[in-house]
Amino acid sequence: MPAVNATATAGPRRRADASRNRERILDAAREAILEDGPDVPLDTIAQRAGVGNATVYRHFTDRKALLRELMLYSMTRITDAAEAALADRSDAFEVLRGFVHTAADERVGALCGMLSEDFDARQSDVIAARDRLTHAVQALMDRARESGQLRPDVAIGDLMVAVTQLGRPLPGSECAHFKRYARRHLQVFVDGLRNPARSTLPGDPITMEELERRTT
């Protein structure tokens, strides 16, 4: 019987453990920042993640690096949700509706408002993440439109503005029941996407390119 190479098997295990720790740190950072703001102490994040401070610094050299990776992490989670929705071959509009709620739960709008100063949208990995997100969400919308259920005068930017804005708490309010309020208004928004449209929208459909020009 061949000998088991303990060093070889330990390598993948260590990498898997490191990946889980990184994800725990980012999840804990997201919740802590949404609750207490971007200046929440790193040791609080480490405690919430169930890791030591040294583990946090091993993954993220400083607070700025952590906040930057958190934004990318949230973008990736939303993209993963969109790609999972694309694999669902049931009613195209209801699949889109489910994605909108999942994306809003990520609260990326609230994070953007707090972390924008530390996030350079021009870097290559950010552009790649945004392109992947755009492609997946656009495909979801195209499928709903081809089914005849999505009104023709909305674009991906319209949807992403709603997801972002409805992920923000009310100004000057902790809003303990925020999720319930957000879900109600998301439902109203998604119902307004249905074809046939009941009104004419002012202006032109908002594209992702237009959003990027206004936010960079």
Image (spheres, grey):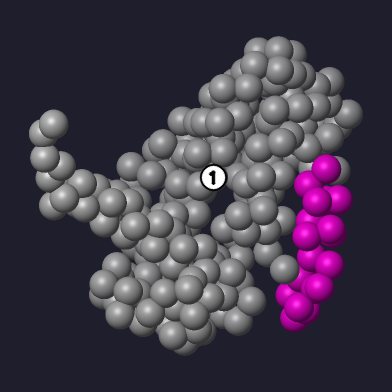
Q: Is residue 194 above or below residue 101?
A: above
91 and 202: which is toward the camera: 91
Looking at the image, residue 190 lies above or below residue 196: below
Where does the magenta region start and end?
170-187
Is 52 on the left-hand or right-hand side of 153?
A: left
Q: Is residue 196 magenta?
A: no
Give above or below for 66 relative to 172: above
Q: Along the horizontal axis of the image, is 134 left or right of 181? A: left
Which residue sits at x=80%, y=73%?
175
- Expressed as whole percent of the image width and height from the top left, the position of residue 172 reads 75, 81
Q: Quadrant of the image for the C terminus?
A: bottom left
Circle 1 packing at 10 Å, graded few (<14), some (14-19), many (20+), is many
**Location of residue 159 by image quarter:** top right
The residue positioned 54% from the left and 45% from the top of the image is 78
Return the residue found at the far front.
1
Residue type marked 1: Ile
Residue sitting nearer the eye, 12 or 71: 12
Report which quarter residue 164 is drawn in: bottom right
Residue located farthest toward the right when viewing the structure as drawn: 198
In the image, is residue 178 part of the stretch drawn in magenta? yes
Query: Where does the N terminus fall, quadrant-wise?
Result: top left
Can the viewer see residue 121 in this picture?
no
Residue 211: percent from left, percent from top: 51, 48
Percent x, y for residue 67?
Answer: 41, 69
The kind of secondary structure element at disc 1 is helix
Residue appearing at x 39%, y 63% in the figure: 21
- Residue highlighted by disc 1: 78
Q: Is residue 142 above or below residue 62?
A: above
Q: Position of residue 103 (x, y in %)?
A: 62, 46
Can the viewer see residue 157? Answer: yes
Judge by depth and name the residue closer to the eye, 98 or 213.
Answer: 98
All told, the count of numbered labels is 1
